Each structure stands twice: as C-alpha cells, then as structure tokens.
Image: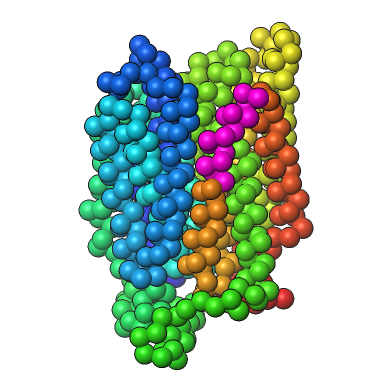
Amino acid sequence: MARVGVLRQYMATVLVNLLGVSYGTISGWSSPALPKLLQPHTSPLAYGAISQQQASWIGGALCLGGVLGTFVGGAIVDRIGRKWTAWAAGWPLVAGWVLVILADHPYHLMGARFLGGLGGGIEFVVTPLFVSEIACTRHRGTLSSMLMLSCCLGVELAYVYGALLPYHTIAWVSVSVPLFFLASFCFLPETPTHLATVCHLEAAERSLRFYRGIRTEKDAIAEEEYGRELQLLHRMQQDRLTLPAKQPARLTWSDFKGRHARQAFLICLTLMALNQFCGAFYMMNYAQSVFAESGSGLPAGLSVIVVGLIQLLGCYVCTLLVDRSGRKILLIVSSAGMALGLTVFASYCYGQELGYDLATLGWLPLLCFSFVVFIGSLGVGTIPFVMLAEIMPQKIKGFATTFCMATNWAFAFVSLKYFSTIGVLFGMHGILLFFAICSLAGALFVLFVMPETKGKSFQEIEQMMEK
C-alpha cells in the first residue's frame, strides 16, 4: 500500500469525523450547562431557571433527533451517496449551535439538542459506511474506531469549554467545527463502492486509485489488494447491470432470512443494547450530576474534565489495539471491566445512602468513574460501530445500519430520559447495579456468540458468517 494512499485515507477519515467532534460537543454540552440552567442566579436564559422536567427533555431531545436523523440518513445514503450524505449532516449541527446562541427559552434548547441529534443520527449512519469503503483491510479497524474517538474529543472539549468559557461563547467557538467541515469535505471523492453500485465504474476506479495512492499502471500491478478490490468493483457493477433498466436494487424478505443476515442482526442489535445499557453514555451526559449525587469530595466540574480526558485516552488506545488485539478480546475485557467498576461504584453509593462515613474514600467515585469510562471506551463504546460496518451483508448494509442505529438512539433516549427517574426511586446505586448486570451479560454474549473479524476482508467475513 502506497504511503500517500494511507495518508489520504487518514485525511478523509479525520475530515468526516469532524462531524463526530461537533456532535460530541453538543452531547457533552449538557453536563456543564444544565446545572447552570437549573439555578435561578446562574441561568443565562431570559426565561429564568428551568425545571428538572425541562432539563430531562433537553437531555432526551438529542436522542429523538438522533432517531429521525438515522432514518433520514438511511433514506438518502444510497441515493445521493456517502459523501453528500455526510456533508448534509453538517448543516443541522451548525443550526443547532446557532439556536443555542439565540436561545432565551428552554424550548429553544430542546430544539438545538434535537438538531444536534439529527446531525449525529445522519453521521452515525454514514460515517461507518464511508470509512469502511475507503479503508484498506489493514487499517480498516483503526480508521473505523476513530468515530468514537472524535465524539469523545468533542465531549471533552465541551467539558473544558464549560469550565473556562462564558455560556454563549461556547456556542460561538463550537460552531466553527461543522463550518470548517462543510467548507473542506466537499472536495473529497465519493467512495469507490458506492460509485460502482450506481454503475459509475470509471469514477469508482479513480476514487479507488486516489484512496490507495495508485498513480501508474506499474503501481496497480504491484498492489495485490488493489487488484482484488478492482475485481470486486467490476462484479458489483455487473450485479447491478443484471437488474432491469432503471429498477432500483430492492430488498426482499429473502435478503434477511439467510444465516449471514440473521447472525449479523443478532450480534449488532445486542451490541447496540450493550453500548447504551452499560451506562457509559448516560454517565458522560450527566457526569456532573452523577458526581454530585455520589457524594464525592472533589469539585464536579474538575472531575468531569479529568474523566473526559480518560475517556479520550481510552478511545485512542482502542484505535491502537483494535487491529492488533482484535475486536472480540477488547469487547470482553471492556464489558467485564465495566461490570467490576460499576459494582464497586454502586457499593460506595449504597454505603453513602445507608449513612456510613466514607469521607476517607472521597477519591473512590472519581477512580471508579474514570476506570469505567476508560475501560468502556476501550471496547464497548467503540467496537459495536466497527462490527456494524464489517459484518452486515453488502446488499442490506444501508438498511441494516439505519435500523441498528435507530435502535441505538431509542435505547439512548430511554437511558437519558427515564434512568434519572429510576435514580430517584432506587438511588444512584440502583442505576449503577443495573448497568453492571447489563455489562456482564454483554461480556458473556461476546465470548460465546460474536466472531472475530480482525484482518479479514469483506469476502472472508461473508464466508465466515455463512458457516
């Protein structure tokens, strides 16, 4: 693989993941913003302090937008292509931050979070497809895992902005990221796979040469993987040409009845549930509140910045290990580690509720939270989206990605909207123990059901899933 080709793959992946940075920022924005909005003397809104119910809707609106964005992304990703679908995702993110700047009522902030979720929903559909279709086999896992790394970077930026910048300045700074994306991403070529499926074979070959750094015929002959990929593009075009003229490649029930499709849906939907019900997404969105309710002696604002950095470190370590250690071992270690960390955290919170003097253990919530976030970022927070892009059959991949991501957003909405209520009824320890049980169940599922895809081409994965 020519070095220039690898650099182009990384460049394109970094650019498309600016969407993840922007979405992560608007996702993490709620952690430092909601405590201010809830207090009469610190609320920046002309409306005044918001209620706890309004705060929960501001949190949950992100996921409602994500569900809609998932269906919008699924509807257009095969029609206008991966490139322009990703570009379209930038506009709701810009609009969301503009609405934060102009907001003087809680409904405006709900709308801003909804728009952020809309952009994020489209992004989570198209980014795994775009990256997996431009990446070579050797670097596919690393590049695909950058989706969550970029989101974690955005979340950490939101925490730092919340600690250092005035409320409205945060939105002005944050809107620059999607604006830069819109100005730069449009110059990249479409993915070779999509171009081949719409019968633009010459453009598909040019795109493949661009992303593989192939400049001459001599380079093309020397690159064995390039030759296999080119043959695959030709076969995809031939399959498309066998359909009647102008007839779309419609899905039928038989496309979902094969062993490959059934196994892939079982694995991906279970991983989506694990991704949300392990508690990592909930805890990062309500990080300051979790620290405040846990009784930690450390300042909540400082604690979440530290935890955000640890989450970012975990995602970065995942990008280093995913193509070395493999997907399966990372998921098992991550899920089991989260179960352990959450159980210890729940025990601390239960001790606080029983009235024990735990002042000497004031450092334990930060340690547990940091451990849970790091070990979760190492696998559970990242690998499900890598697997989704790898194991689905090519024909149903667009629909399957949409369906699985919509399910993920629905799980996220339940987590953000209703788990706070559960916390009121059963205490913080009750929520943490529920997350621990889900994490342990996920570890067992991965151990006994999920296959390893490290180092395998899409054709090899397909053959493995059919057995």
Stretch of the chain drawn in magenta: 411-425
> In the rendered picture of this protein, how many numbered marks are placed on residues?
0
Q: Position of residue 12 (x, y in %)?
A: 35, 59
Drawn side of residue 456 relative to residue 259, left or right: left
Relative height, residue 282 to residue 267 (above, below) = above
Drawn side of residue 123 relative to residue 95, left or right: right
Name the quadrant containing residue 177.
top left
Relative height, residue 335 to residue 251 (above, below) = above
Quarter occupied by the N terminus? bottom left
Q: Nearer the viewer, residue 36 or 421?
A: 421
The stretch drawn in magenta includes residue 318: no
Relative height, residue 10 to residue 178 (above, below) = below
Drawn side of residue 415 relative to residue 82, left or right: right
Q: Nearer the viewer, residue 398 or 460?
A: 398
Taking the spot 58% from the left edge, 13% from the top edge, the residue there is: 297
Q: Quick check: can you spot residue 92?
A: yes
Quarter occupied by the C terminus? bottom right
Taking the spot 27% from the left edge, 20% from the top edge, the residue there is: 46
Q: For the stretch drawn in magenta, what is the main secondary structure?
A: helix
Taking the spot 45% from the left edge, 80% from the top edge, the residue there is: 249
Q: Position of residue 415 (x, y in %)?
A: 57, 38
The stretch drawn in magenta includes residue 418: yes
Taking the spot 60% from the left edge, 79% from the top edge, the residue there is: 254
Q: Position of residue 136 (x, y in %)?
A: 47, 68
Q: Position of residue 153 (x, y in %)?
A: 43, 40
